[in-house]
Amino acid sequence: MNTGKKIWLCIVGLLLIALGVYCFTSPSLTLLTTAKILGIALLVEGIIKMVFTLRTQAFLPFSGTRMLSALLDILFGCFILFNLYSTAVSLPMIFAIWVIIEGISVAVQSFDYKKAGFSQWWLIFILGVCAAILGFFGMQNLHVTAATLSALIGIALILSGLANFFAVIGVSRIEKALRL
């Protein structure tokens, strides 16, 4: 890898780390930005899905359901984009509800592992119940949930930035080893 690419990788790493730190210092703006990204992603996905459906409806049956799904994605994306603040405020509650549902789902699925003979099925059950309980507590204090979401996004960005630096170090070591 040439030096220019390594420098760019390091610059991107620094920017990701800075953005991650910023997420810790500005949780409300982090949620607002997350809402905007979610709205744009749904809008783009809906448009792409609609174009795909229109191009393939002649030979793929049941294109009506795909078209309906595309329209709903577009409408939901537009709804989010025109209601960014409401979406940002709702994200902690949506996340908490998702954690509750996922926790219950994992707990219920643990019984399938029990039936299949997995002796540690009860660990999966306990983890699912714990997740559901955490989701319930998240619903009780949405400010903490919002700060937690922002912190998780910040941590993910920081880790991605650090990964860039380790990639540069790894590539440099590999290149050095190949030259010997």
Image (cartoon, rainbow, N blue to C red):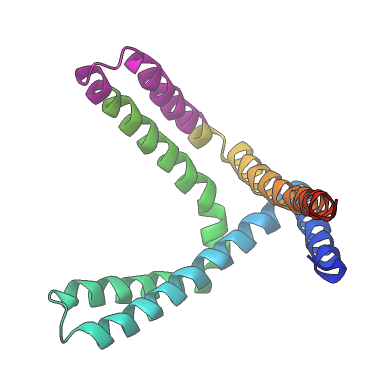
Comparing 38 with 136, the one in front is 38
The residue under the point 39% across, 31% down is: 103
Prevalent SS, magenta region: helix
Residue lying at 63% horizontally and 37% vertically, measured from the top left: 144
Quarter location, residue 12:
bottom right
Q: Residue furthest front?
A: 180
Image vertical order of residue 139 relative to residue 167, above or below: above
Q: Residue at x 39, y 79 (%)?
A: 48
- Residue that extends furthest to the top in the rendered view of this protein: 119
**Is residue 47 on the magenta stretch?**
no
Q: Is residue 155 above or below residue 176?
A: above
Q: Pick whichever, 92 or 130, lies toward us.
A: 130
Q: Is residue 1 visible?
A: yes
Q: Is residue 22 visible?
A: no
Coordinates of residue 125 in the picture (x, y in percent) = 35, 20
Rendering quarter of residue 164: bottom right
Q: Which residues are magenta?
A: 111-137
Q: Is residue 57 left or right of residue 17?
A: left
- Numbered-mark total: 0
Vertical arrangement, residue 64 with respect to residue 19, above or below: below
Q: Is residue 131 above or below residue 33?
A: above
**Residue 134 point in image, percent of width and height:** 49, 28
Magenta-span inclusion, residue 115? yes
| Residue at (38, 75) in percent of width and height | 46
Left or right: residue 66 compared with residue 92: left
Position of the N terminus, as image quadrant, is bottom right
Question: Is residue 35 toward the left or the right of residue 10 in the image?
Answer: left
- The percent position of residue 16, horizontal first and vertical second, equals 76, 57
Residue 159 point in image, percent of width and height: 71, 46
Dividing the picture into quadrants, the one containing residue 108 is: top left
